[in-house]
Image (spheres, helix red, strand yellow):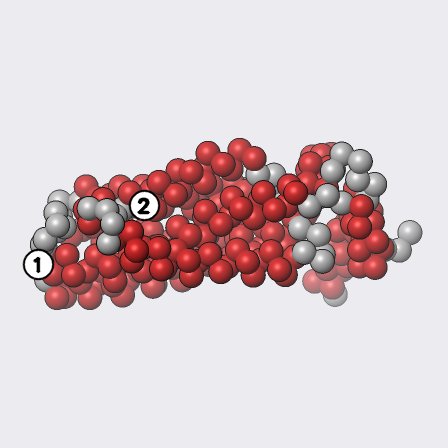
Amino acid sequence: MVLDNDSVLEVQKGATTLPLYCTVAILFIHNISLGISFYFTSVTVPYHKDGSEGYLLLTEEQISWYLSLHQLAVLIGSFLGNPCGERVGRKAALLISNVLTMLSYAAMFFAQNFELLLTGRLVSGIAAGMGLVLPIVYLGELSTIKLRSGMANSVNLFIVLGSVMIYVVNMVIPHKLLPFVPIGLSGIFLIASFALNESPQWLIRTGRLGKAAEVLRNIRGREYEGVDTEIEEVLRVNLSNNQTDQG
């Protein structure tokens, strides 16, 4: 049987959407933490300049490294995100990103020297880079065709919310406690991640068809009749891609 997007669209009309929206809500938490990570230094640098509010006193040169190397770390993390997601799965890669985020900000909070502070900031950049593209890929493989673009775009908007949130939080909590904001958000994400499913497309590509079918029933509804259709479509696309690569 030859399948195409039209046949998948037709069977997906019978899918429930509530599990997908719950997934999006959990990814909101992850992306708010990302937005905070990108702008964390711009909020904390004034405290590092004069060593106030319990922050480590830094020289102008140290501040320059503190600001600039984070962008390089994000780039490195972005390159690592896809191989990591292909190796261990989308969900597991998101968990790794958030664990690294928690460890990095804990290191920055307890840092008594510039070396540890910079190491923490670099790790937070790698974690942010890993977690930047993964939600888009994950949702693209999890959601229905009609909801795919809207869900991916809405999740990305919460990165902007995170960038605004760090400035607001800076005005209402003790400044020394700022690292605990991304730590707390990542902790909440890790707890909520128990409700997340692995990407069915990744499971299919790694030969776990039974598990992929189970995930599709979880996110599309127990009465969903398009499980086999979606699996066959992914298998067909993967076969076509493999033949193209070999050709």
Position of residue 175 in the picture relative to residue 16 (left or right): left
Instruction: Give the residue displayed 35% in from the left and 40% down from the top.
Output: 184
Could you tell me if residue 232 is visible in this image? no
Return the residue found at the far front.
172
Q: Badge 2, how many Cα within 10 Å: few under 14, some, many 20+?
A: many
Q: Position of residue 172 (x, y in %)?
A: 25, 49
Q: Does residue 235 appear to the left or right of 21 in the view shown?
A: right
Within 10 Å of disc 1 (Cα), the crowding (few <14, some 14-19, many 20+) is few
Please name the amino acid that badge 1 sits on.
Asp
For the C terminus, the quadrant is bottom right
Residue 156 at x, y percent in the picture:
50, 59
What numbered label is drawn on residue 246?
none
Q: Earlier in the sequence, mark 2 or mark 1?
A: 1
Spatial CA span between label 2 and label 1:
23 Å
Q: Quadrant of residue 203?
A: top right
Q: Secondary structure at mark 2?
A: helix
Above or below residue 27? Residue 146 is: below
Residue placed most toward the observer, 113 or 33: 33
Mark 2 lies on residue: 181
Q: Quadrant of residue 3?
A: bottom right
Q: Is residue 150 visible?
A: yes
Looking at the image, which residue is at 46% across and 56% down? 158
Q: Position of residue 101 (x, y in %)?
A: 36, 46
Q: Residue under circle 1?
A: 50
Q: Nearer the viewer, residue 22 or 38?
A: 22
Q: Are marks 2 and 1 in contact (CB under 8 Å)?
A: no
Element at label 1: helix
Residue at image coords 40%, 42%: 186
Q: Residue at x 51, y 44 (%)?
A: 26
As shown in the figure, which amino acid type bears the numbered disc 2? Val
Residue 142 point in image, percent of width and height: 65, 48
